[in-house]
Image (tube, rainbow, N blue to C red):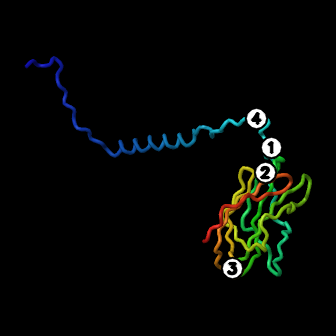
Amino acid sequence: MQQSAVPELELAPPHTRPIHWVATATAVAGVVALSSVLQPGSARAAQATGPETKSAPVTAAAPATTGVAFPLDCGPVKAVVQRQASGDLDGDGRPETVAVVHCDAGMGTPPDAVYVLTQAVGARKPRVVATLVGPKARETVTDFTVRDGAVRATLLGYSTTDVPSCCPDVKDSAQWRWRNGAFVRSAPAAAQSV
């Protein structure tokens, strides 16, 4: 067997010291911090422009719910806005606000009502322009969104007037869209027992 002309080197086992770990941790922390600052811009899908574009971008402020006189008879208690969401529902470039409102009952489950608010340019206060769910329907609104020009909600209700208000036994999904000058409720999915 022939000997190699290059001598073999013996490497000493590495001896790490605490300063090496501190330097490594500092370098990693610096990379993480720098990467959180230097994020790429948000991705945007290219949208076609042309006749299929229905509305201009929404730039106006959505109507506020404070000070609005909701058409809800609460007697001595006040109406409470439980949830609200905004979006351009009629395609005019100005947002509407959809509010889920009920009476501030001390106990029990007061029924919800769903109202659409708009505010004309120069008007001092917003006004209610549509009732999507009235309080006489005895429904409670759970999942609620305004997206893509539609109002979507899950409604809990009652199969008969004999069912106690505490215990709704019907669950229904609803969607409303602005069509031909009015909000049209889409055919709800089949009602389900809760």
What mark, if any, has residue 86 been given in the picture? none
Q: In this view, does 159 lie to the left or right of 134?
A: left
Report if residue 61 is visible in the image: no
Q: Distance between the residues labelled 2 and 1?
A: 9 Å
Name which residue lies at 72% across and 71% down: 139
Q: Is mark 1 on a helix, strand or loop?
A: loop
Secondary-structure class at tag 3? loop
* Above-or-below relation of 141 to 77: above
Residue position marked by numbered label 4 in the rendering = 49
| Residue where numbered disc 1 is placed | 55
Please rate how many residues cluster around mark 4, counting C-alpha atoms within 10 Å: few if below 14, some from 14 to 19, many from 20.
Answer: few
Q: In this view, does 131 lie to the left or right of 35?
A: right
Q: Tell me the amino acid under the disc marked 4.
A: Thr
Sequence-first tag of 4 and 1: 4
Mark 2 — residue?
88
Residue drawn at (72%, 64%) of the image: 83
- The quarter in which the C terminus is drawn is bottom right
Mark 2 in CB contact with mark 4 (< 8 angstroms): no
Q: Quick one: label 2 or label 4, which is nearer the N terminus?
A: 4
Q: Position of residue 27 (x, y in %)?
A: 44, 40
Asked whether disc 2 touches disc 1, contact meaning CB atoms under 8 Å apart, the reply is yes
Q: Report if residue 96 is visible in the image.
A: yes
- For marks 3 and 4, give the CA distance: 50 Å
Please tell me how crowded label 2 is: few (under 14), some (14-19), or many (20+) other residues with Cα within 10 Å. Answer: many
Mark nearest the camera among 1 and 3 is 3
- Label 4 – label 1 distance at C-alpha: 11 Å
* Quadrant where the N terminus is found in the figure: top left
